[in-house]
Amino acid sequence: MRLVLTLLLWLGASCALAESQTFGGYTVHYIAVNSTFLAPAIAAQYKIVRSKRHAFLNIAVLRNNAGGSTTPVTAKLSGGLSNLMQQSSKIAFNEIHEGDAIYYIGEFDFSNAETLRFKIDVQPEGTGSSHTLEWTTQLYSD
């Protein structure tokens, strides 16, 4: 059932830019993807709206273990996006568990070729510290 995560990793390698940041013993992987990249059945399964002007974030938080392995962990995520005109909106995240995998999906609308700036606070569960992810990306309608 790790189809969405597998798809997103494939997208990261082929047509979208998957990124990661490491902080305080955790690595956070994140990607923004146009929802039309998902097959209709997969979008329906995860209740993701498919539209040329609708996209989603996929964020996974992993604890870095001794020996180089990682363990998925739950986290509190909050934040949103803004465009070049400083219009901003919050993004609500849904936590998804598939086997041992844990990741977060947050949906948002965009305009074709719009440059978006994301600012997401990530606090791994059980820690008192958080880290702010900030990045800019441009999304295109199909």
Image (spheres, rainbow, N blue to C red):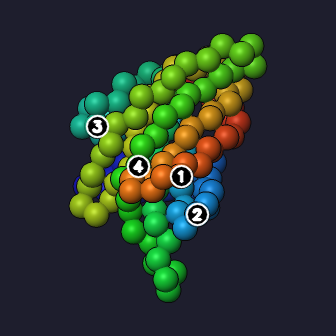
**Labelled disc at residue 46:** 3
Q: Residues within 10 Å of mark 4 (few under 14, many from 20)?
A: many
Measured Cα–Cα span from mark 4 to mark 1: 11 Å
Q: Nearer the viewer, mark 3 or mark 4?
A: 4
Q: Are marks 1 and 2 in contact (CB under 8 Å)?
A: yes
Task: Determine which quarter of the picture holds residue 73.
Answer: bottom left
Residue that sits furthest to the bottom in the current view: 67
The secondary structure type at the circle numbered 2 is: loop
Residue at image coords 67%, 40%: 134
**Labelled disc at residue 129:** 1
Say which label, 2 or 3, has the lower sequence index: 2
Q: Does residue 37 appear in the picture of this structure?
A: no
Say which label, 2 or 4, has the lower sequence index: 2
Say which label, 1 or 3, has the lower sequence index: 3
Query: Does residue 132 appear left or right of residue 77 in this picture?
Result: right
Q: Nearer the viewer, mark 4 or mark 1?
A: 1
Say which label, 1 or 2, has the lower sequence index: 2
Residue assigned mark 4:
75
Residue 87 position (above or below residue 105)? above
Say which label, 3 or 4, has the lower sequence index: 3
121 vs 60, nearest the viewer: 121
Identified by mark 2, the residue type is Gly
Residue at image coords 24%, 61%: 99
Identified by mark 1, the residue type is Ser
Residue assigned mark 2:
24
Say which label, 4 or 1, has the lower sequence index: 4
